[in-house]
Amino acid sequence: EILADIKLPASKFFKGCRWLVWHYKNKANLGSDWGRSHESILHFRKSKSFTMNVDHVRISYGDHTLKYPEHPQAETSQYGNGENSKGRIWQPNPAGAKPRDVIEIPTTCNGMHEKTNHPTQKPEELLRKFVLASSNPEDMVVDPFLGSGTTAVVAEQLGRKWKGCDISPEYCHWAAERIELVENWPVEKWIQYDLENERRRKSIR
């Protein structure tokens, strides 16, 4: 992984880094080797007080948690809301569980409204996770390798300012077309939209 070569030298310029994984299950294995089902992501932080909007990127709970919703939990539990004290009975957060460092979202595929012919297009749902978690409305989002425009589309959806560029005029044209079609939804509706899609995917597995 080329990211492994980047992580150490980049640590000179950042105060912290987390290794995240984008995991997908809908990509065919047409070769004779282990099938690839993930891509690695480095989340660098400029300072220790970085933006992390946990409540905007919560995920649905597992079946076991929903079946047995009340049980003692440690204060540091990934499911907790950070307010538990010793002896207090924990209950699921109505907005969902805290996000994990493995993000499970399908790749873009034929039939999806957002699909273009870009060879490495990322799904809008994946980029929404990062923009929601790591920025606030009116913040600036920059993508120096804009490709088909997914980062700009998502920033536009979520009320962020954005800048992007790409060496390919064709890709820039695709990006401009997609930006023109952005739905004018409130941020809360996009959050609910992604959460409902996640629940729907789990229900059909």
Image: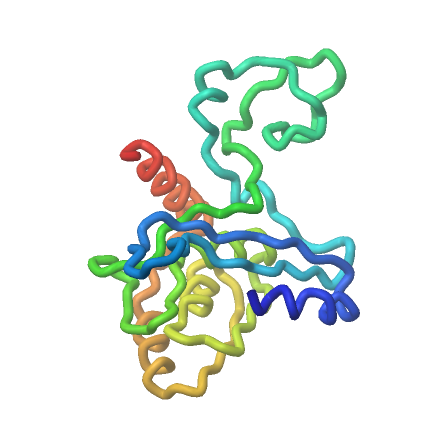
Which of 167 and 195 lies nearest the eye of the viewer? 167
Q: Quadrant of the C terminus?
A: top left
Coloring scheme used = rainbow
Q: x, y percentage for residue 41? A: 56, 59
Which of 5 and 107 lies nearest the eye of the viewer? 5
Q: x, y percentage for residue 152? A: 45, 69
Left or right of 68? Residue 116 is left
Q: In which image quadrant can residue 204 be found?
A: top left
Q: x, y percentage for residue 95? A: 50, 33
Which of 158 and 108 lies nearest the eye of the viewer? 108
The residue sitting at 70% across, 22% down in the picture is 74
Which of 31 and 68 lies nearest the eye of the viewer? 31
Asked if 108 appears above or below 144 in the picture, the reply is above
The residue sitting at 76% across, 16% down in the picture is 86
Asked if 88 appears above or below 147 in the picture, the reply is above
Given the current orientation, which residue lies at the most extreme left position? Answer: 111
